[in-house]
Amino acid sequence: QVQLVESGGGLVQAGDSLRLSCADSGRTFSNYVMGWFRQAPGKEREFVAAISRGGSYKNLADAVKGRFTISRDNAKNTVYLQMGSLKPEDTAVYYCAADRSPWRVQRTTDEGAYDYWGQGTQVTVSS
C-alpha cells in the first residue's frame, strides 16, 4: 500500500526558499504519478505540480511556474517540491498525492484522479 508522509513545511519570509518532501513507505512508489496540491484557508484545494513515474514529464500550475520545481528520487521513494521566491499567497497546507494511472497531463490537475494522499504540511510565508 501507499502511505505518503510530507515534511519540510514551516514559517518563512517572502522571497525565501523551502523544499518539501513526500516519502512513501511502500514498495511501489515508482508505479505512481505523483502530484502536489495546496489548500489555503477558506479556499478549495488547488493543483501545484505533478511528475510522471520516471520523472521525464512534469506539469506545474501557472501560479508557480518559474518559482517551484518538482522532482523525484525513486530509489528513495520520495518526491520533492522545491519552492523559491515564496510569496504570502503561497501560504497553504501542501499535500502530496499518488495516482496509479499512466501519465496524462490533463489528468494531473484533477485531484479526483489521485488514489492516495498524505496528511499535509503547513507552509506559511510572512510578508
Image: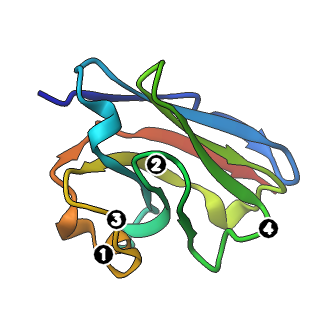
Give the residue drawn at x 30%, y 75%: 107
Q: In x, y percent, where is residue 95?
A: 39, 47
Whichever of labels 3 and 2 marks the residue nearer the N terminus, that label is 2
Residues at marks 1 and 4 touching, judged by CB atoms closer than 8 Å: no
The amino acid marked with disc number 2 is Tyr
| Mark 1 and mark 2 residues within 8 Å of each other at the beta carbon | no
Q: Nearer the viewer, residue 13 or 19?
A: 19
Does residue 85 lie above or below 27 as drawn? below
Quarter where residue 103 is shown: bottom left
In space, the residues marked 1 and 3 are separated at their CA atoms by 8 Å
Q: Is residue 59 above or below residue 118?
A: below
According to the image, label 3 marks what residue?
103
Q: How many marks?
A: 4
Which is in the foreground here, disc 2 or disc 4?
4
Residue name at image x 67 percent, y 36 percent: 19
Q: Residues within 10 Å of mark 4 (few under 14, many from 20)?
A: few
Local crowd size for mark 2, using a 10 Å CA cut-off: few (<14), some (14–19), many (≥20): many
Nearer to us: label 3 or label 4: 3
Badge 1 is on which residue? Answer: 107
What is the distance, in whole Å, between disc 3 and disc 4 at their CAs?
22 Å
Q: Earlier in the sequence, mark 1 or mark 2?
A: 2
- Say which mark, if any, is on residue 66: 4
Residue identified by numbered label 2:
94
Q: Locate residue 114, reporting x and y percent.
A: 21, 58
Indicate left or right for 33 with 90 as reference: left
